[in-house]
Image: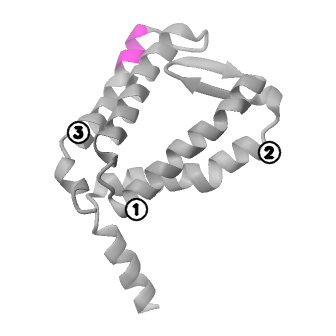
Amino acid sequence: MRRVFASITAEWVKRRWWMNLLFVFCLYMTFVYMPFDLFLKPVADDEEVWLGFTLHGWWAKATEPLHWLIYAAGAYGFWKMKRWMWPWAAVYVAQVAVAMLLWNVIDPRGAGWAAGTVAGAVFLIPTIALLRSRSAFDSS
């Protein structure tokens, strides 16, 4: 049991604490949510958001593998701290920030400019942190 704990601890200290959160999020999306979304969620309930625009039904289902690939690449990239993660992780999170703003303005369920600005600003925090972390990804 000590070896398992030591192995997990050694893995955890490879990254900054907030990168571990992103890593765990990518793992969750890759191994839990995206398989559920792709294989179990009914097409009628399916939605995918790309750059703030919501796709529904079969259009959403057709783009899910791309989301799955992005999260899997993120999980692998954070696990191995791959060089190619910089700047691509930041670019992806930046487009999420833009998407949060646009979705709140474009989608009828959105809460408008103010909420979109706040939501987008929240995602700018990890975007900036990732952009400033080039040296963390230089190890492999």
**Does 33 sit above or below residue 27?**
above
Residue topped by disc 3:
131
Q: Is residue 107 magenta?
A: no
Q: Is residue 61 above or below residue 11?
A: above
Q: Secondary structure at mark 1?
A: helix
Residue shown at 35% from the left, 21% from the top = 118
Mark drawn on residue 40: 2
Locate residue 23, reporting x and y percent.
Answer: 42, 55
Q: Check disc 1 and give the amino acid type.
A: Trp
Magenta-colored span = 113-117
At x 28% / y 61%, what residue is drawn?
A: 15
Residue 75, x across and y down, in percent: 46, 55
Q: Which residue shows up at 34% across the image and 76% down it?
A: 9
For the residues marked 3 and 2, what is the alpha-carbon distance in whole angstroms? 36 Å
Relative to 67, 117 lies left or right: left
Residue placed most toward the observer, 28 or 70: 70
Dot 2: what SS? loop
Is residue 25 in view? no
Q: How busy is the neighbourhood of tag 1: few (under 14 within 10 Å), some, or many (20 plus)?
A: some
Q: Which mark is residue 79?
A: 1
Q: Main secondary structure of the magenta part?
A: helix
Pick the front one: 96 or 109: 96
Identity, as a three-letter code, of the amino acid under mark 2:
Leu
